[in-house]
Image (tube, rainbow, N blue to C red):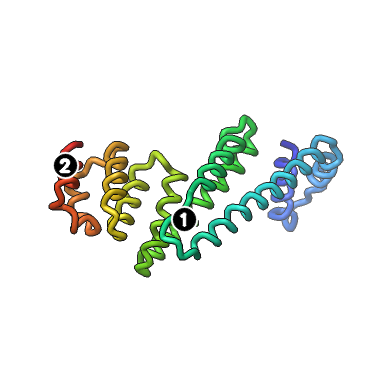
Amino acid sequence: MRQTAVEEYERIMRNYAPYFKLDSLVTKIKGLKKLKIYKKELKDHKRIAALEDTLRLKFQKKFSVEVESTKSKYNFKWWEKEIGKLEGKYVNSEQIHFQKLGERIQYSLFAMAYESSNVYIQNKEFDKALYRNQLLIILRPKSAYMHFRAAQSYARTNDMKKLLQHLEHALQLGMKDKEFLRNTKEFNPYINNDSFKKLLDKY
């Protein structure tokens, strides 16, 4: 890409201009910037940057509104729909710049949910931590660890049914260390429960 070449040349200029004569490089940069394809690439880059800002803001606003909600239950249909659109239109795009855009937004959402979940767990605000762990499952549905975290959250909020549901998903997805699960402090109140024991014995 011409834009990438120009950026690299300009980086060289910034780093080495005080020490070397770089007249030929200056001429090269000017020549590239006059090319129609460079101008198109620059325009496309700005358009993608603006699109990324718009998408980030949409997700951040939704996240900010919901994390401060006092609801004990959330409807995640919006997240499932919008993340599905993000994956279909961008992450799975044949165009590499759209793929990267989608991946950056996915990662920023994951980091935002994961880090804030840990903060609320430390603060013993377990309902808010649960919201974030549910969101992490939408972002990483095939992650055994994310289902394990959700099971921990449901244990903290005394929801045995959901605890078993997500613990089973974690086991199905490869979390096989039964001793680790039995020693997880959040599961301690349930280790003698028949349903809990049967689930561990099943895998």
Q: Is residue 35 above or below residue 195?
A: above
Q: Quadrant of residue 62?
A: bottom right
Residue 74 in the image: x percent, y percent? 46, 54
Residue extending furthest bottom? 123
Q: At numbered mark 1, what does the secondary structure look like: helix, strand or loop? A: helix
The disc label shown at residue 50, or none:
none
In the image: residue 41, left or right of residue 77: right
Q: Is residue 49 left or right of residue 136?
A: right
Tell me if mark 1 has few (under 14), some (14-19) or many (20+) residues whose alpha carbon lies within 10 angstroms of its own: many
Checking the image for residue 113, the label placed there is 1
Residue name at image x 31 percent, y 49 percent: 162
Which quadrant holds residue 198? top left
| Quadrant location, the N terminus | top right
Image coordinates of residue 184 in percent, x first then y, are 22, 55
Residue at 75%, 41% in the rendered image: 44
Whole-percent x, y for residue 117 in the image: 41, 59
Q: Which residue is mark 2?
A: 198
Please report contact status of discs 1 and 2: CB closer than 8 Å, yes or no: no
Q: Position of residue 200 (x, y in %)?
A: 18, 42
**Crowding near the residue tagged with mark 2, few <14, some 14–19, many ≥20 C-alpha atoms within 10 Å:** few
Decide if residue 42 is on the left or right side of residue 100.
right
The residues tagged by marks 1 and 2 sit, at their Cα atoms, a distance apart of: 32 Å
Among the two numbered marks 1 and 2 on one chain, the one whose residue lies closer to the N terminus: 1
**For residue 121, what is the image quadrant?**
bottom left
Q: Is residue 130 above or below residue 68?
A: above
